[in-house]
Image (tube, rainbow, N blue to C red):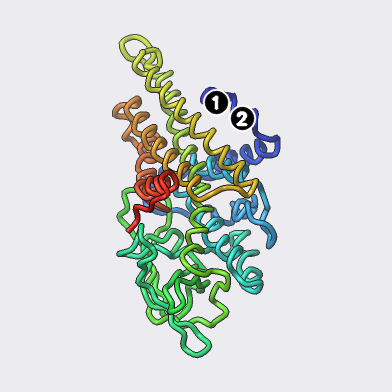
Amino acid sequence: MSPLDLLDVDSSLSAEERQIRTVVRQLVDEQVRPYVAAWYEEGRVPARELAREFGKLGLLGMHLTGYGCAGSSAIAYGLACLELEAGDSGIRSLVSVQGSLAMYAIWRYGSAEQKQRWLPTMATGETIGCFALTEPDHGSDPASMATRARRDGDDWVLHGTKMWITNATIADVAVIWARTDEGIRGFAVPTRTPGVTVREIRRKMSLRASVTGEISLDDVRVPASAQLPEAVGLKAPLGCLTEARHGIVWGALGAARDCLETALQYASSRTQFGRPLAGFQLTQAKLADMAVEWSKGYLLALQLGRLADAHRLRPDQVSVGKLNNVREALAIARQCRTILGANGVSGEYPVLRHANNLESVLTYEGTSEIHQLVIGQRLTGLSAFA
């Protein structure tokens, strides 16, 4: 049993869930850990190659059914996200965006033809997708999006710009959200369509082992069959975000666990004033507090997973998980850095890389402030949104 599992929570997992976790952990140990520090430093990652490896294990859209998807439980998917993010947040983001955003949007809102066209090869990693909702001037307020789609005969013509889009520069299909005369609608747009321009966003200080881009749509013409027929209104993209946020609840625990394990090992082997750092009261207090918060986050994630598997998970409940687990994971990463001292800022250790990544995780798919307001609305019955 891991020393971090203070409450023996692992005993509540099924044998299948533990096996999935073991397999994903081994994959991360073999194909991510030896290289991720260099990927982060260079700001590049072999995302397509990794996607194909993940596809072989059934990790892409693993909680979806049909079309080559594994149909795994929400808890199994969460454990996979935890192990992936223990490697790096950018690696988990690759899987989350592919499966919980791009694939889920097509699986939940697409036509039979769209599902058959895209999902089987997305599940294997041969086809990469991205989810284009955020805009340069509209992040937390997607209802104010400026991207437009207008009818022109039997076609749709899209115009606008999307920003901070994970997988954008390697994507074969982009799920584009745009304002129409009938409200917000979604479109599955092949990225090679004339008028689509993708630019990689460089010089990031966070999520450097992740592909991020800007998508410009200059009167992009797509047939009527590109529209996702069941995606009606803002609730459609928000429904996709709820799916992805559940993975984040688990993923943040992975980053925190890797920091904690690193700090525990370092403190046990590093000697100062004639004894290991782990033997000092202040160090033990830090480790104890962090382990307690990690355990609470793990219990929270498990409860949300159970609700999801029972089809009873509400968006505000996911907000509780995203707000707490990412916020606490970031606090754990920062505290672990103090235990490592100057070595904590070295790329030889993963702690500051995780902390930098979690700064982005804290913001994307709903900032902490947005989730606070979602929870506040649930508590009071009053909306604080404009």
Q: Residue at x 57, y 79 (%)?
A: 225
- Write down the residue under mark 1: 5
Task: Please name whichever residue, 274 or 230, is drawn nearer the observer in this view of the structure.
Answer: 230
Q: Secondary structure at mark 2?
A: helix
Q: Residue at x 42, y 73 (%)?
A: 179
Amino acid on which the number 2 mark rests in the picture: Asp
Left or right of 18 in this view: 354: left
Q: Seen from this angle, which residue lies furthest front?
A: 381
The answer to whether residue 350 is visible is no
Q: Residue at x 62, y 41 (%)?
A: 306
Percent across and percent down for residue 343 are: 33, 30
Percent across and percent down for residue 134 are: 38, 62
Left or right of 221 in this view: 147: left
Disc 1 and disc 2: Cα gap in Å?
7 Å
Percent across and percent down for residue 250 are: 52, 41
Percent across and percent down for residue 335 are: 35, 29
Q: Secondary structure at mark 1?
A: loop
Name the quadrant of the C terminus: bottom left
Q: Is residue 335 above or below residue 165?
A: above
**Residue neighbourhood size for the residue with mark 2, other residues' Cα within 10 Å, grouped as few (<14), some (14–19), many (≥20):** some
Q: Seen from this angle, which residue lies furthest bottom?
A: 153
Q: Is residue 148 above or below residue 88?
A: below
The answer to whether residue 46 is visible is yes
Find residue 276 and report its image quarter: top left
Name the quadrant of the N terminus: top right
Amino acid on which the number 1 mark rests in the picture: Asp
Left or right of 62 in this view: 148: left
Q: Reading the chain from its start, which is encountered first: label 1 or label 2?
A: 1
- Cβ–Cβ under 8 Å for marks 1 and 2: yes
- Write down the residue under mark 2: 10
Q: Residue at x 70, y 35 (%)?
A: 15
**Residue neighbourhood size for the residue with mark 1, other residues' Cα within 10 Å, grouped as few (<14), some (14–19), many (≥20):** some
